[in-house]
Image (tube, helix red, strand yellow):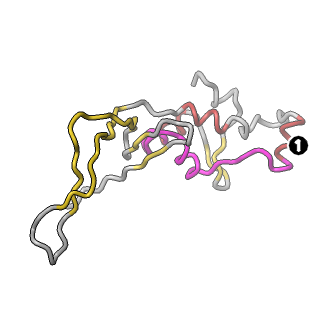
Amino acid sequence: MKLITRLTIKGRPSDDAVLCTPTSTFLLRTVGISNSLMICRPPAESERPTLAIRDISHEVLECLPQAANLERIRLILRESAWGGLGSDTEMKSKKRKRGDVRKWTRAQLESVVQASEGELERGLRERNVIEIDGMSECPPSRLACHADT
């Protein structure tokens, strides 16, 4: 039996990169090393069984466990959050009609929220985010998308 684990690097260009497994999030950082790390390539089938040095590195990537950035869910969905019946401000209603309010799919949230699949699922559930017509929506702010939830 093969064990296959999906690894994903996430983050916006201004973020520190994180490596996500299905259940955990790790900060990636470059660490200089005093020894040389030699990257070798296998020999071609026609060559003698020797290794050839392909590259030499003096840095490695270190993975440090990190809490998922679940606060980003609220920040991203805040502008498009539904305010309840009759609660849209005039400006927000105009923006919605013009299409200026960005809506987010689950896949788009997965790409910018620095969290594993499991952590993201928990974060969406804790914030009561629902999916309507393929778009993620927060319920009225008085019910769910508070910073204190």
Is residue 5 in the magenta section?
no
Q: Residues within 10 Å of mark 1 (few under 14, many from 20)?
A: few
Measuring 63% from the left and 55% from the top, which residue is drawn there?
134
The quadrant of the picture occupied by the C terminus is top right
Q: In the picture provided, is 71 more to the left or to the right than 7?
A: right
Q: In the picture provided, is 26 more to the left or to the right than 109?
A: left
Nearer the observer, 100 or 118: 100
Q: Position of residue 37 (x, y in %)?
A: 22, 45
Q: Position of residue 52 (x, y in %)?
A: 19, 61
Measuring 33% from the left and 40% from the top, which residue is drawn there?
61
- Check disc 1 and give the amino acid type: Lys
Measuring 42% from the left and 42% from the top, which residue is drawn there?
118
Q: Position of residue 3 (x, y in %)?
A: 25, 56
Q: Position of residue 88 (x, y in %)?
A: 83, 36
**Residue designated by label 1:** 94
Q: Quadrant of residue 117?
A: top left
Measuring 43% from the left and 42% from the top, which residue is drawn there?
116
Is residue 109 in the magenta section?
yes
Nearer the observer, 111 or 23: 111
Residue reaching furthest top? 148
